[in-house]
Image (cartoon, rainbow, N blue to C red):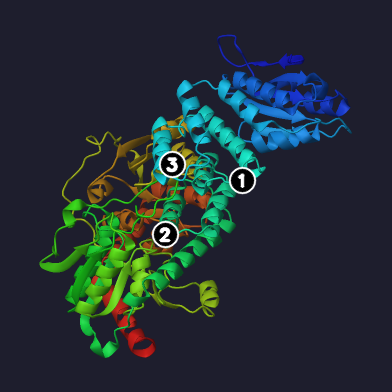
Amino acid sequence: MGMGISRMEGIILNDKNETYYNKTIYCYVEEQKNRLDEFLLEYDNESVIHIVPSVVESCEGHLLYCLCDIITNYIEAAKKEETEIWFVTDVKSLYNIVGKLYYSLFEKVIFIEQKNDKEFGNGLEIKEFINYFLSVQRSILQVSFMKKLWNMKNCDNIDDFENLLLELYGFKIDKEEFLIKSWNCFCELLLYEFENDFYKDISINYKLTIYSILMKLSKNPYYTNKYLTEVLDNDFKAGNIYFVWNQYKYMSLKKRAAFDKKTPLLQNKLYEKTYNLFLTEFNKNLVKILLEKRDKNLVMILTIQFLDRTHAPTRTVVERTKALKKLGKNIILVNTTEQYIRMGYLPTYNTYCGTVLGEYDNINQIQIGDNKFPFFQMPENSPMEYRMQVLSELIKKYKPYYILSIGTGSILADLCGNIVPCASMALAFSTIPKTKNKMKILGRKLTEEEKKFYANEDTDIIESRFTFELKPQKNEFSRKEKGLPDGRFLLVVVGIRLEFEVSDAFMSMLSDVCSKGCYVVFAGIMDNYNTLMEQYPFVSANSSFIGYCDDILALMEICDLYVNPDRLGGGFSIIEAFSKGVPGVYLKSGDVYTAGGKNFSVNDFGEMVEQILRYKDDKDYYNKMSEIAKERAKLMTSSEEAIADIDRQICQRIEEKYW
């Protein structure tokens, strides 16, 4: 069909005398009445406007013809990469179907009420439309992947879905905007196909595959929740549900999907269901060992991940092991390898599994400081039945007084808490750990609001002080060797997840302080640094990305101020800064606030600008806060006293409340 009427009124934007339009608007309408003219008049000067009048008649009453025309025109417009593409109609049924199937393509889908009573007279021939959609795609390889997925609706072989999703990730469909939109649209078409009863027996793995692609690419919490609901509503094994729970833990940390208020409730249901299924399955292993039969000087530490000493969570485990040993405790250390566990796979696009060091598989003791400790690591591909059997036998053999679980969401630790009492500690110590165990260790004091909330909960929260063992400094850096300017006030931003933690609000704040003489050093892992700097040229001209730094103490010596984005983690790095007399500025949330204390906190990024500039311009204030920072570092690296208090509280509760 013909395009109809085109109106183009642009603005000259560049020195090549090229006309640039920041919007392309497609109007598929029945009539050109005043309401449409009023709408278009607002955007005439910045848009290319295409009008298809009498759209129902033009398409011979076939919705299929209309949707084919729309996708063809969209692809043509999408070649102009910097333009927004809008869709406008006064046909209600067309508005509904475009909003459903094409929502990912258009920046806006708009309905204009013009009292039009014409509608398309037949339904959508979905198979024919999918075939047409495939025929107009740019890439033959992309079409082959789409056809492969389309033909898997009755496939039950989970390996086939895993291989396809791995191939799609390798094809990098999440790296190019056009591919992201095309795949979102294609998956919507597949959903429309099976949701409208075109097929009776759709494989659950097919549904999960489509939902997982949509939730990762569209960043729409609707699909996040649909995926979780499908997992909860189907008869999956406990291991499958636990795998999904771990994937969602990772996605929330790395912001790989969008969540809403419903999502945490569904996540909690996942964990609850996993625990109850395993509890039933492993009930014969969960026989209580009474207090009088347990070794009062023995503690079993369970950790969900144990790597090398460059890994901050591993340093936390090591520090607690050494501190408990100094208290006269004997320690057995077990790595359950549950962090983003591989077992129980269900179809998930861009799956992430935790790192397990194979060098620990065949050892039975590990050197920490001056001592060797019994050590056992679960093979990463071992089934949960095996892990539970091994753990229950270890507990029965050694009879520890209690278990200390380090790392949130350890189902094995929660189950073992039915054999001997278990206290759980999250690695994000400012939050209460996710656990079914009654004793939950928090690395700070409860707020008054939290006290009221937990007053009626069947839980026992141990308030503590989370402490740090810092890696010894091995180097002395100079600004010159790091490519940093002398004579500038250097702000340092540290983190291994900066790509996900540095927000637009934080960057706007940095733009403000850079305009007033500050220079920013980004240290860690930040794959999007160059892309981000294109959006913030003032920060780009006044910043450096130095990559991962293995000696943060040496880096802090050549920087002036630690600055933290709005994030959950980062507790180690603020204490590393404080130990070198480098003050910090951060919001009143997360691990950095808990570790650094209120003296260095601000309410928002506006206050952060004011505080940074005060540090820069007021030397006396800087020196005063530098001394306070050093004192805070001494307190937060005094592990023995803090661990002794935790041990005392755990033992007291065991004797008073548990068995």
Q: In the image, is 30 to the left or to the right of 577? A: right
The kind of secondary structure element at disc 1 is loop
In x, y percent, where is residue 132?
61, 23
Label 2, label 3: how far apart the Cα atoms are: 19 Å
Q: Identify the residue shown where x is 52% and y is 64%.
A: 269
User: Along the polypeptide, which appears first: circle 2 or circle 3?
Assistant: 3
Q: Residue 200 carries which label?
A: 1
Of callouts 3 and 1, the N-terminal one: 3
Which amino acid type is shown beneath numbered disc 2? Tyr
- Mark 3, Cα crowd under 10 Å, few <14 / some 14-19 / many 20+, is many
**Mark 3: which amino acid?**
Phe
Q: Nearer the viewer, residue 114 or 164?
A: 164
Q: Mark 3 points at which residue?
A: 161
Q: Mark 2 points at which residue?
A: 242
Instruction: Point out the frontmost of discs 1 and 2.
Output: 1
Q: Which amino acid does label 1 sit on?
A: Lys
In primary-sequence order, the first of circles 1 and 2 is 1
Which residue lies at the image location 68% right of the left edge and 33% below the top edge? 108
Quadrant placement of the N terminus: top right
